[in-house]
Every structure is written in C-alpha cells, then in structure tokens.
Amino acid sequence: MSNIKLDITKAACFLEAGAVKAFEPCVKNAQQALEEGTCPGNDFLGWLHLPTEITPAFLDEIEATAKVLRDNCEAVVVAGIGGSYLGARAVIEALSNSFGWLIQDKKNPIILFAGNNIGEDYLFELTEYLKDKKFGVINISKSGTTTETALTFRLLKKQCEAQRGKEEAKKVIVAVTDAKRGAARTCADKEGYKSFIIPDNVGGRFSVLTPVGLLPIACAGFDIKQLVKGAQDMEKACGKDVAFEENPAAQYAAVRNALYGKGKKIEIMVNYQPKLHYFSEWWKQLYGESEGKDKKGIFPASVDFTTDLHSMGQWIQDGERTIFETVISIEEPEKKLLFPEDEENLDGLNFLAGKRVDEVNKMAELGTRLAHVDGGVPNIRISVPKLNEYYIGQLIFFFEIACGISGNVLGVNPFNQPGVEAYKKNMFALLDKPGYEADSKAIKERLAKEQ
C-alpha cells in the first residue's frame, strides 16, 4: 500500500525561498534528541518506536479480551478523559457508520464514552440508557483518581454489578491502568478484573497505540493489526535517517515552525469528511498539550468543511492573518452515491446530474483552498488514499512523531502538562477535599473579597 502524502507548496510560498530548508539542521537535531533520549521529557519516549515493538501475541491478547466483551455486551462504555479516550474515539468515529448508534447491529456492541466530563444530565441519561442493556466497562486511568473518570466508573461499576450480578460483572469490566500503583490498579487486583498496562513512559496523548486505544477499537470491531501496520510503515517513513525532503514528519515540523516565526499563531485542522471530527479533537489535544507552555505554542483549532464554511469561513477568508490551515483530504470514499437528475430543476443543480457526490466535495475542497490561499492563508495538505485502519494508523504516528520534533524545535518539553494541574487544585480546594484545607481557606477568602 502507498503512504499518506504531504504537500507544503501552498504554505512554503508564503515564506522566503529556502525558509523550510533552513530548518533542516534544527529538525534533524530535534529528532536526534528524541532518538538518543537527550531531550526534555525523555522519560516519556515510549511511544517513539511503539509500533514496531508491538508483538502479534500482544495484539492477539487484546483481540481475545475484546471478543469477550463483544460476545457478552450490547454496549461497552469507555471511561476515560483526554488521551485516555480521544484516540480511541477518533479512530472509532472515523471508521464507523455515521448512524451506527441508530442501527441495531447484531455483530458489534455500541461503544459509548463517559468519564470525560462532570455533566450530571449526561451521566443520568447514560445510566438511564443502560438500564435495560447488557453492558461492559473499559476503565482507563493510570491513577484511578482522576475526578471525571473515577466518578463515572464508580457509577457504572455499581450499576453493572446491580444489573448482572457481581461475578458476571467481573467478566465485562476491564481495567487499563498502571502496572503496580494507583486506585484503579488496586481495584482491578481486588475484584479480579482483566487488566492491561499503560506503560509508564507513554503519556496519555501519545497512548492510542497502547491498550488505551487498541482495546476499545477492537471492541468496536475494527482491525487493530492493520492499524498497527500503518503506524509501523509510517515509523519507517519518518525514520531519523530518512532524507529531510523525503521525511513527511520533518517537513511538517519545519514548515509549521517557519510559519509560526512569521506570526502565524493559529493552525486550523480542516477536514471534508464528517467522520474525522474526533480525529481533529485528538490532534488538538496532542499539539495543544504538547506545545502550549512557557508562553509559546501554535494554537490548534479545527473546522469541519463544508459545514463550517457557512460559519467560520468568513473569518478564515477575511479575518486577521495569523492563521494557517492543514487539510486532511481523503482521496476515495468508501461508498458511492450519484447525484440524481430532476425534471423541474428548481434548484438549478441538473448540471451535477450523474456526478459522484464526492466529486462535488472535492471541487469544494479545491475551490476553498484556492480562495484561502488567495486570501493570505498558507495551506498544508495531507492526502490520504482511503479512510481505513491502515491509513488512520499512518496518520496517528505521523502526527505523533511530528509533534515530538516540532515541540523540541520550539524549545519546550513536549511531554509534560504542568498547566493542567492548576484548575484541579482550585476545584479540590472549593470541594473541601481532605489535604487541601489551607488552599480551601485561601480561595474562599479570595472569593469573599471579590464579591
């Protein structure tokens, strides 16, 4: 199979001649630092060669556990937040029937996602929906104490045990957690749940090719071996010894940093396939959490075209010129649908009769790209032959390795997230969590003064 293709010509034309090439030494040094483990955050580099380190026996074990859930569940709830859920959801939504949740599919359980918010209505409605369902749970948490996920898992565990009995519930609750430590590990060992390990050296946003992502994806009925094969092939295509001009990750890291240096502070991820909405959400976490620190970093945003051309399109075309776009273009859709002819032709669209709907979509994509480039928006294009497990695997590793390189070029630690803890400290203080007494007193005094 061929690889995804990167085209930076409509972005490089906004830079001085040779500007992308000028980043070659910096990019090479950044990738070398990743390979040698000399970069900041080097204790979180377990994802770097993860695709080629995954064994067939490991994938067989994942698939065997997925089969138990598939055979015994009408629904499987994935409890996790951030990197513990976005990767799995990105792949599952990209490959699923757009209306799968309405279809009574006898082969595959419906995959639901929870533990990613604290919405009381959401959780109430979820538990109501599950009342007459045989459901299982995949609890994904390294610590087991992340508020959103822990709260949700407690609710789901109690409900699953009440509906199925404690012994049967044990067969359909799976823990994906730390090897030795944490509340989720303690619970899994105590209850006798099947469990998989989140490697210590793989951060959440880089974890989709670990059991964090692979188990839910397998439960949904998709081919995780092809997903991993795609990632393996992209690992080779982006290897440290691949020439700069032929290495798509190196090129992407170079051009986005060159644009950033010229005042392009916002990168907009664009898709023309609704199925890729959650892939953009995964990408936003990957780049936002990796690069947004030390008062630096490109702001990652996303739009779904052509839908958002009727809302955000105006701003992108004519707004402040601090943006560039990265477009994921799917060359060949899975299905075929021809545009019909209509005798009255009231909408004036008979000129499209007999054409594939995707041809209309492709011309919208090309026309938009031309308009945005003319409007001063640099455009990067990633061409994907088909939307399947293999090419999604390629996209995942492409963006991961490019992120690691790009963060190092920017001069930040791409693998930590110190800013994430700020809201938690305030929340726990406001909830009077034991151990936060001093913080609780201080924040309440502050709020009293501000009233």
Image (cartoon, rainbow, N blue to C red):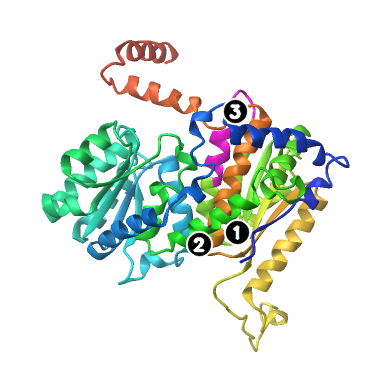
Residue under label 2, please give it. 389
Q: Nearer the viewer, mark 1 or mark 3?
A: 3
* Magenta segment, prevailing SS (helix, strand or loop): helix
Image quarter of the N terminus:
bottom right
Tell me the residue that label 3 is attached to.
39
Vertical placement of 346 versus 41: above or below? below
Residue 87's spot in the image, x, y percent?
46, 49
Which of the two discs, 2 and 1, labels the residue nearer the N terminus?
1
The amino acid type found where label 3 is placed reads Cys
From the viewer's perspective, tell me whether residue 200 is left or right of residue 376.
Answer: left
The magenta span reads 283-296
Can you name the residue that lies furthest to the bottom here?
343
Element at badge 2?
Answer: helix
Give the CA distance from mark 3 to mark 2: 31 Å
Instruction: Residue at 37% x, 56% y: name it.
Output: 57
Residue at 53% over, 44% down: 49
The answer to whether any part of residue 178 appears in the image is yes
Which-is-in-front pick, marks 2 and 1?
2
